[in-house]
Image (spheres, helix red, strand yellow):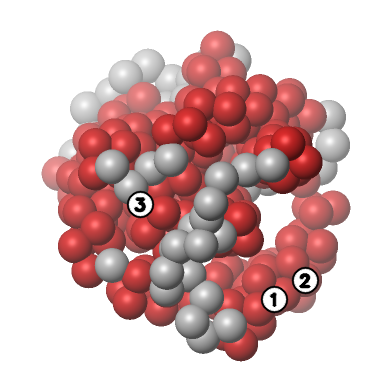
C-alpha cells in the first residue's frame, strides 16, 4: 500500500462521481461494483489493490445502506441477527481462498446462474410485489444460513452479482422487493466488513483513493436507499432486472476475451 497522497482535482472529481453512482445503484439492488471497480482500474492501480480499495470504499456505502434500511423498519432483524455472522465468516474465508485459487474458474457458473435469476424474475411478473413471508421453519433457517455463508464466501472470493444473488435469496423466502433489498443490504454489509478488515490487515488498500470515493458513497447510498423506500417495489424490480442484465453482459464479455 502506498502512502496517503493528495489527489489532484480531476482525480478527486472522478472518484467522487463514480463513487456516488456506484453506491446509489448498489444500495438499491446491488451491482455497484460494475461502476466502482472499472473506475478504480482506470486509475492504474494494480488488480489486487483495485479489489481491496473497492472494499475499502464500499464499506462506507454498505454501512449507510444497512443503517438506512434498518431505521426504516423494513428489515427483519430477527432473521438478520442469525444470518449476519454467517455472511461475515463466509466472506473472510473467501478473501483467504482467493489468494490460493484463481476466481476466474467461477465465471461460467456465475453467468449461468445470473441468466436463470433474470429469466425467473421476468416470468414471475408479480413476484416480490407483496410480502408473503410468515417466518422460518428450522429447515428453512438452516438453508438460509447455508446460503448466507455461501454468498458471503462468494462475495469475498469473487464478488460480481453478489448483491443480486442476496436479493434473490430473500425474494425466494417470500419477502417483497423492499424487504429483500433490506435483507440483502444487511448481508452485503457483513461480507464487506469482513473483506475490508482482512484487506486492511494485509495492507492492500490504497486509502488515497478509498477515502474520497467512500465519502461520496455515503451520499449515494443514502440517496438510493431513501429513493427505494419512497418509490417501493415498482421502482426496485425494474432496476434489479437492468442491473442483472448488465452483470450478465459483463461476465459474457470477460468469457469471450
Residue 182 lies, with reference to residue 122, above or below; the image says above
Which residue is at 35% across, 51% downward?
27
Quadrant hosting residue 118: bottom right
Q: Is residue 74 left or right of residue 162?
A: left
Q: Quadrant of residue 171?
A: bottom right
Residue in the foreground of this view, choosing between 227 and 256: 227
**Residue 56 position within the rendered picture, expressed as x and y whole percent measured from the top left:** 42, 30
Q: In the picture provided, is 25 more to the left or to the right than 241?
A: left
Q: Residues within 10 Å of mark 1 (few under 14, many from 20)?
A: some
Q: Are marks 3 and 2 in contact (CB under 8 Å)?
A: no
Q: Is residue 41 visible to the viewer in this orientation of the structure?
A: no
Label 1 vs label 3: CA separation?
22 Å
Mark 2, secondary structure of its residue? helix
Picture disc at residue 183? none
- Whether tag 1 and tag 2 are in contact, CB under 8 A, the answer is yes
For mark 2, what is the residue?
112
As helix, strand or loop, the secondary structure at mark 1 comes to helix
**Which residue lies at the image location 65% right of the left edge and 27% below the top edge?**
86
| Residue drawn where x is 31% and y is 74% of the image | 235
CA separation in Å, label 3 and label 2: 24 Å
Neighbour tally class for label 3: few under 14, some 14-19, many 20 plus, Cα within 10 Å = many
Q: Residue visible at 81% across and 65% down? A: 108
Residue annotated with mark 1: 115
According to the picture, the residue beneath numbered tag 3 turns out to be 27
Work out whether mark 3 precedes mark 2 in sequence or the reverse, and give the earlier one: 3
Amino acid at each position: 500500500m502506498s502512502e496517503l497522497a493528495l489527489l489532484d482535482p480531476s482525480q478527486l472529481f472522478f472518484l467522487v462521481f463514480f463513487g456516488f453512482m456506484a453506491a446509489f445503484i448498489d444500495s438499491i439492488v446491488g451491482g455497484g461494483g460494475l461502476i466502482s471497480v472499472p473506475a478504480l482500474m482506470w486509475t492504474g492501480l494494480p488488480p489486487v489493490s483495485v479489489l481491496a480499495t473497492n472494499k475499502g470504499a464500499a464499506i462506507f456505502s454498505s454501512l449507510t445502506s444497512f443503517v438506512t434500511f434498518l431505521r426504516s423498519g423494513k428489515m427483519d432483524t430477527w432473521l438478520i441477527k442469525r444470518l449476519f455472522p454467517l455472511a461475515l465468516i463466509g466472506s473472510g474465508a473467501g478473501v483467504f481462498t482467493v489468494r490460493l485459487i484463481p476466481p476466474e474458474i467461477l465465471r461460467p457458473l456465475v453467468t449461468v446462474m445470473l441468466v436463470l435469476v433474470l429469466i425467473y424474475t421476468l416470468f414471475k411478473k408479480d413476484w416480490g410485489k407483496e410480502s408473503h413471508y410468515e417466518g422460518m421453519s428450522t429447515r428453512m433457517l438452516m438453508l438460509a444460513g447455508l446460503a448466507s455463508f455461501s454468498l458471503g464466501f462468494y462475495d469475498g472470493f469473487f464478488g460480481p452479482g453478489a448483491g443480486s444473488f442476496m436479493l434473490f435469496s430473500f425474494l425466494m423466502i417470500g419477502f417483497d422487493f423492499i424487504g429483500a433489498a433490506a435483507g440483502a443490504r444487511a448481508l452485503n454489509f457483513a461480507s464487506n466488513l469482513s473483506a475490508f478488515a482482512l484487506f486492511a490487515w494485509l495492507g492492500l488498500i490504497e486509502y488515497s483513493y478509498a477515502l474520497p470515493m467512500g465519502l461520496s458513497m455515503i451520499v449515494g447510498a443514502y440517496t438510493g436507499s431513501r429513493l427505494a423506500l419512497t418509490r417501493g417495489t415498482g421502482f426496485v424490480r425494474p432496476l434489479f432486472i437492468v442491473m442483472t442484465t448488465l452483470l450478465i453482459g459483463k461476465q459474457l464479455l470477460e468469457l469471450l476475451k
